[in-house]
């Protein structure tokens, strides 16, 4: 199922209905309501939804944004935080997001679980990325530092994984009540929770609970693939039994993600074999991506992967008229 995230145009609109109209103009009717949404846009979203303008396939936590957070910050509060009041706020806002997900008849709520605060991103994943940009991926120094990163993560991560797991134990009860699945997203930085071994353990822990599953972010995982922390196709194959859906975006080597599909290095033909066509294939693009570029990519997607459309293949992508020469 082809779908589109509001993260692309949320910042350009003050009215939720106008925001939805712009996405509909791309030729996509299934929409994920993403983080960064202000409460002032909710009435417009309701008008569009109640009028049948779009189908809400899912919601991304936090939705809407906490009123005290003035920027788009899905990680403003973390279940892994050392501060009890921040963990409590994360729980409170997630439960509120579940309420909105149920109102918009969403199938899932995408969750970030937190980070390992003893491993600041710039010092670890940031340094690995800088070495990659400098062409040092084959240098023994790169391998040595990557091993140091892995050992540090393994040594310090257990406490934060446990905190995240404890939060999920509480949230999943409400998820079952609202009949909205918790989609635990793959993250792009090695310090994020859960790491790959933790993600497997988490999914096995909830194996008998139908309201928790895995959300694959193609760009995030490709960044880790580029860092040689995992192999993308192998990881997706391992997680296929737990998969709920995916965020689709491309990556320009080595670390520029949220790009328009077919403009980067991802091999969709190989990877999409692990994602069933009826699952949400949600395009999650940065605000800087041009409508013309997106329309061309959507048309290409429709031609290559028509089985994923379900309601989008008959909707034209409204491109602007060509400029006269």
Image (tube, rainbow, N blue to C red):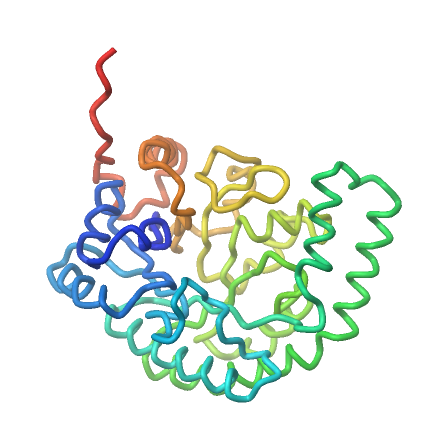
Percent x, y of residue 46 = 17, 66
**Location of residue 103 (image quadrant):** bottom left
Relative to 224, is 148 above or below?
A: below
Of the pair 191 and 28, the residue shown nearer to us: 191
Q: Using the image as rendered, state which of residue 137 and residue 214 is in the foreground.
A: 137
Relative to 291, 228 lies left or right: right
In the orientation shown, which residue stands out farthest toward the left?
Answer: 51
Up-down relation of residue 272 to residue 236 (above or below): above
**Which quadrant of the rendered structure holds the C terminus?**
top left
Q: Is residue 132 left or right of residue 148?
A: left
Q: Is residue 176 left or right of residue 86?
A: left
Where does the image place residue 280, in percent across and percent down from the top left? 38, 55
From what the image shows, is residue 239 above or below residue 315? below
Q: What x and y, as percent, mark residue 54?
A: 21, 55
Residue displayed at 78% across by 62% down: 150
- Image location (x, y in percent) of residue 36: 37, 63
Image point 62% across, 38% down: which residue? 253
Judging depth in this view, the residue of 117 and 231 nearest the camera is 117
């Amino acid at each position: 199922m082809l779908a589109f995230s509001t993260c692309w145009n949320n910042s350009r609109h003050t009215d939720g209905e106008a925001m939805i109209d712009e996405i509909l103009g791309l030729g996509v009717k299934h929409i994920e309501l993403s983080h960064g949404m202000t409460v002032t846009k909710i009435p417009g979203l309701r008008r569009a939804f109640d009028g049948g303008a779009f189908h809400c396939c899912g919601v991304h936590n936090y939705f809407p944004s906490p009123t005290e957070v003035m920027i788009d910050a899905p990680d403003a509060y973390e279940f892994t935080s050392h501060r009890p009041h921040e963990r409590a706020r994360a729980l409170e806002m997630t439960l509120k997001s579940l309420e909105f997900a149920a109102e918009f008849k969403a199938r899932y709520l995408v969750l970030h679980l937190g980070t390992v605060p003893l491993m600041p991103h710039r010092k670890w994943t940031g340094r690995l990325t800088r070495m990659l940009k400098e062409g040092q991926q084959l240098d023994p120094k790169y391998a040595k530092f990557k091993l140091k990163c892995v050992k540090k993560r393994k040594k310090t991560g257990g406490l934060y994984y446990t905190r995240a797991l404890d939060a999920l134990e509480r949230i999943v009860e409400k998820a079952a009540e609202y009949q909205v699945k918790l989609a635990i997203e793959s993250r792009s930085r090695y310090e994020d929770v859960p790491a790959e071994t933790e993600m497997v353990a988490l999914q096995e822990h909830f194996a008998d609970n139908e309201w928790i599953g895995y959300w694959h972010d193609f760009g995030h995982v490709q960044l880790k693939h580029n860092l040689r922390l995992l192999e993308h196709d192998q990881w997706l194959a391992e997680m296929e039994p737990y998969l709920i859906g995916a965020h689709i975006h491309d990556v320009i080597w080595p670390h520029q993600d949220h790009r328009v599909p077919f403009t980067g290095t991802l091999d969709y033909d190989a990877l999409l074999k692990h994602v069933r066509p009826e699952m949400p294939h949600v395009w999650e693009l940065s605000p800087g991506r041009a409508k013309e570029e997106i329309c061309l990519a959507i048309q290409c997607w429709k031609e290559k992967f028509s089985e994923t459309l379900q309601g989008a293949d008959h909707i034209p992508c409204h491109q602007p008229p060509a400029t006269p020469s």
